[in-house]
Amino acid sequence: MLERIAARRAELELLEEQLVKQLDEVRVERDELVVAERVVQRISEQGLVEYLSLAPAPEEAQVGGRSVLLIPVRADAAGPDALPPDYRRILAIVREAAGPVKVKEVGSVLGLPVEQRGKLEPLRGKMNKLADRGWLRKLADGRFAIAF
């Protein structure tokens, strides 16, 4: 009978060790979730407006039942007024520069956090779209200039 009691005590001690370890893991994960929740709240409060303003615009919209490009090809447009406001702002910054500019320079003028990875990618996409549609010229070194 004492052997059974000793065996059961050993089983319970082993189970207790496992449960303590599992409880520690649960607490660590819970703490990580609290931190993640804070980060998401800060991003949503501070960066959502910025993120949405630089999010890629949809390529086309329906106007009068017809598909039209939101960022028109330069030859088809009457002028920069045909562009959405954020694209006109980018175009004005490049136009005011002394020469070809990097995306980082435009981002700096726009007040974006240029040192943070990934923050300039939406802007880079917009500048590439302007280059694809003839509003800007993309040089071989990745800089942008006003198209001729």
Image (tube, rainbow, N blue to C red):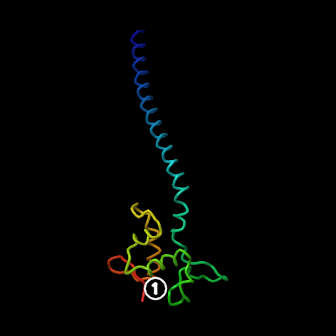
Q: Secondary structure at mark 1?
A: loop
- Residue under the point 42% across and 17% down: 9
Residue 31 point in image, percent of width and height: 47, 40
Which residue occupies the extreme right position in the image?
64
Residue 46 point in image, percent of width and height: 53, 57
Q: Is residue 21 above or below residue 38?
A: above
Image mark count: 1
**Which quadrant of the figure has residue 70?**
bottom right
- The quadrant of the picture occupied by the N terminus is top left
Which residue occupies the extreme left position in the image?
141
Q: Amino acid at mark 1?
A: Gly
**Which quadrant of the figure has residue 59?**
bottom right
Q: Residues within 10 Å of mark 1 (few under 14, many from 20)?
A: some
In the displayed structure image, the side of residue 1 where residue 42 appears, left or right: right
Q: Which residue is mark 1?
A: 134
Front one among 63 and 89: 89
- Residue under the point 40% across and 72% down: 103
Q: Is residue 14 above or below residue 71?
A: above
Front one among 80 and 108: 108
Residue 85 point in image, percent of width and height: 56, 76
- The quadrant of the picture occupied by the C terminus is bottom left
- Residue under the point 38% across and 81% down: 98
In the displayed structure image, the side of residue 122 where residue 102 appears, left or right: left
Which residue occupies the extreme top position in the image?
1
